[in-house]
Amino acid sequence: MKGIAYGVGVGPGDPELMTLKAVRLIKENEVIAVPGREPKETVAYKIAAGAVPEIAEKELVPIYMPMVKDRELIEKEHLKGARTIESYLDQGKNVVFLTLGDSTVYCTFSYLQHILEADGYKVELVSGIPSFCAAAARLGVSLTEWDEMLHILPAVHKTEDLLELPGNYVLMKSASHMKEVKDMLRKSGRSVKAVENCSMETEKIYNDLEEIPDDAGYFSLIIAKEK
């Protein structure tokens, strides 16, 4: 029988925020795939190692997931990564692929999942705590109350007039254009808070829009609420 590929969310950064199921799957399986060229240097691995130290003795499989705009290169590497995982599945071995946050929200494993399933392999997703939920909890704010709507947007700088809908917003993946994002938020008149590197040792909290630096790091997440 062929093995199962598990896309396992390891949460936002704090090993204590990993689920019991994620911990169990890492402990029970010998092949752990990690998005990156050097598994032990990746954020996902370091999070998991904090909860499951024995992961260091597992067979760690690097899966390169380039963050570039070259679609041809991206598709080539995704196919290569899927084929690497399939080589273990064909041996009857399960593969646990570690991914930051939740396995269904802007997840790197999704690209591999589509290929694996198209090739006839079984895939299971294991949910983890999403970064925006962890950030809201860290800030002590609710994302929604009563019938409020919640909008989760990536790379918000690419589109204009995105904050016109009623409700609250989570802005992700916009650190490289933070200045433009901040200008848009000022015009929206919303109450803004942000977390950089949520639940990690390098975590920084910003309780006001003007506190957010223009050079905020990649793992920066903004919550903008109606006043």
Image (spheres, grey):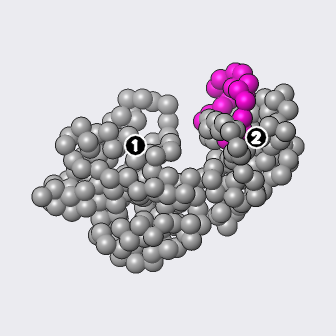
Q: Nearer the viewer, residue 46 or 101?
A: 101
Q: Is residue 80 visible?
A: no
On the image, numbered disc 1 is attached to which residue?
Answer: 110
Q: Nearer the viewer, residue 110 or 43?
A: 110
What is the span of residues highlighted in magenta in the rendered image?
Answer: 154-171
Q: Nearer the viewer, residue 116 or 75?
A: 116
Is 134 drawn above or below residue 160 in the view shown? below
Query: Label 1 sits on what residue type?
Result: Ser
Element at label 2: strand
The residue sitting at the top extreme is: 160
Mark 1 or 2: in front is: 2
In the image, what residue occupies the spot 73% across and 24% down? 164
Q: Quadrant of residue 202?
A: bottom right
In the image, what residue occupies the spot 16% across and 56% down? 2
Do the residues bearing badges 1 and 2 touch, measured as CB atoms within 8 Å? no
Percent of width and height locating residue 98: 42, 58
220 within the magenta span: no
On the image, numbered disc 2 is attached to which residue?
Answer: 224
Percent of width and height locating residue 138: 71, 60
Is 190 drawn above or below residue 160 in the view shown? below
Where, quadrant-wise, is the C terminus in this rendering? top right
Q: Nearer the viewer, residue 163 or 49?
A: 163
Element at label 1: helix
Percent of width and height locating residue 182: 79, 35
166 within the magenta span: yes
Q: Is residue 14 left or right of residue 10?
A: right
Mark 2 Cα-neighbour bin, 10 Å: few <14, some 14–19, many ≥20: many
The residue sitting at the front extreme is: 146
Q: Is residue 107 left or right of residue 172?
A: left
Q: Is residue 80 left or right of residue 161?
A: left
